Image: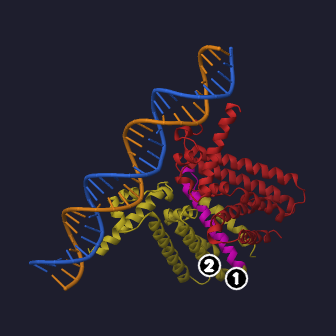
Chain colours: A red, B yellow, C orange, D blue
Amino acid sequence: MSREERKRQTRKALMDSALGLIEQGQHFSNISLREVAKNAGVVPTSFYRHFQDMEELGLNLIDEFSVLLRRVRSDVLSAEQTITVDALLDIYVETITDNPALFMFIQQCRTSEHQEIRNTIRQELQGLAGELASELRVAFPNVSRQRLTPLSQVVVLFLMDAMIDVLDQTALGVEQSRIVARLLEQIGVISAALK
Amino acid sequence: MSREERKRQTRKALMDSALGLIEQGQHFSNISLREVAKNAGVVPTSFYRHFQDMEELGLNLIDEFSVLLRRVRSDVLSAEQTITVDALLDIYVETITDNPALFMFIQQCRTSEHQEIRNTIRQELQGLAGELASELRVAFPNVSRQRLTPLSQVVVLFLMDAMIDVLDQTALGVEQSRIVARLLEQIGVISAALK
DNA sequence: CTCCTTTGTGTACACTTGTTCACTAACTTA
DNA sequence: TAAGTTAGTGAACAAGTGTACACAAAGGAG
């Protein structure tokens, strides 16, 4: 195995370590560099070979989020052109449930103490809303883009909000289906405005 | 000054200290007990005379939030019965801008690592949505409560979401009016569903 | 094969954290 | 006035934190 391959591997181990700690219920704000290193099976000083500090690791997690969204987008585009709203939502909900820690991280860090993290996330979510808007254009060809844009921003807000419930899902014993149901109810309120 | 009066005073100093640190850009999750004590002009050990730990202080901040909302509610009720939606929103927006740290705390701690904090906040925000729903009933008497409830949940989501922009307000040089404008635009999308 | 680059190691340091304990001083009560 | 309760103090400790440094070992380039 080549050296840079190995490096990329431990780098990924560090990022996954952080996500793992989030999945265990920790908040990204007080996950320590040492904890991440230990959890990745690496000595603390080794962390610096990959990231300057936890903020930089965070920014790279946002990047991972961005890549994930791009992949989803290409999936949607490769689907039939006459995709329904329900099918569209299914794709996004599935993406969330497949990557809970990553989405949780994003939701947590919207209120991060590092403004660069906050700004980057804001941009990313705005981009997501933009994607959604153009995808909804297919489903609602007779609705103007002007009305569609704020609408998809709202839907993104719903998606991220649902994350918090997912976090408590196991703790409260709430089935995931109920969360999705609530999500669909909320979006129903919105899409009613389109009919 | 009586002793319990003094105690209540330093207790408030501790809570205000935490809010102050939040206003300075810190995240509640990693505000330390010592920092709070120091900022309140009190020795660390004195903290324990009032709260068991930071989680308990957090729960008391949520209580303060609850009391604030109750006060707002009575303000709204004492207003004219034919209150407009805009006037209603003005009251809430003003409440937020008058207590930015408290609302920011709530928004931050929706993703807290302490599940009791998360649950209490969830309840509180649900309660807020309930209040809003009955207040909106006055403005939209011909809309059923069934449609009003999910709608006000959405509005609450908007209000809390706007908090994040308020946080970056100074940093980005965005005037508060623009934030309020965006908020009104979002809510416009919703209220359009009511007409 | 040899040298250099670089990823990961181990030790070390100064600092902050939560929490303990015995103590003081002042308000309350009897 | 005397005794008791208690909010706040100060020193101390073990544990965890970020970061600097010299070092080892192994891949890459000549």
Disc 1 versus disc 2: distance between alpha carbons? 10 Å
Task: Give the quarter of the image for residue A148.
Answer: bottom right
Q: Main secondary structure of the magenta part?
A: helix
Q: Residue at x 69, y 54 (%)?
A: A125
Quadrant (top left, top right, bottom left, bottom right) of the C terminus of chain B: bottom right
Task: Say whether residue C6 is left or right of residue B65.
Answer: right
Answer above or below: position of A8 versus A137. Answer: above
Q: What segment is highlighted magenta in the picture?
A: B147-175
Q: Mark 2 belongs to which subunit?
A: B
For the question of whether residue B94 can be seen, the reply is no
In the rendered structure, find residue A26 and report the number of the disc placed on it: none
- Mark closer to the chain start, 1 or 2: 2
**Which residue, given by chain and number where applicable, does mark 1 sit on?**
B145
Answer above or below: position of B78 versus A118. Answer: below
Q: Residue at x 66, y 43 (%)?
A: A12
Residue type of the residue flagged with mark 1: Arg
- Tell if the residue under mark 1 belongs to the same chain as the one under mark 2: yes
Q: Secondary structure at mark 2?
A: helix
Residue type of the residue flagged with mark 2: Gly
Quadrant (top left, top right, bottom left, bottom right) of the N terminus of chain B: bottom left
Numbered marks: total: 2
Q: Is residue B108 on the magenta stretch?
A: no
Percent of width and height locating residue B110 = 58, 64
Q: Secondary structure at mark 1?
A: helix
**Which residue, given by chain and number where applicable, does mark 2 sit on?**
B130
Task: Say whether residue B179 is left or right of residue A77.
Answer: left
Q: Mark 1 belongs to which subunit?
A: B
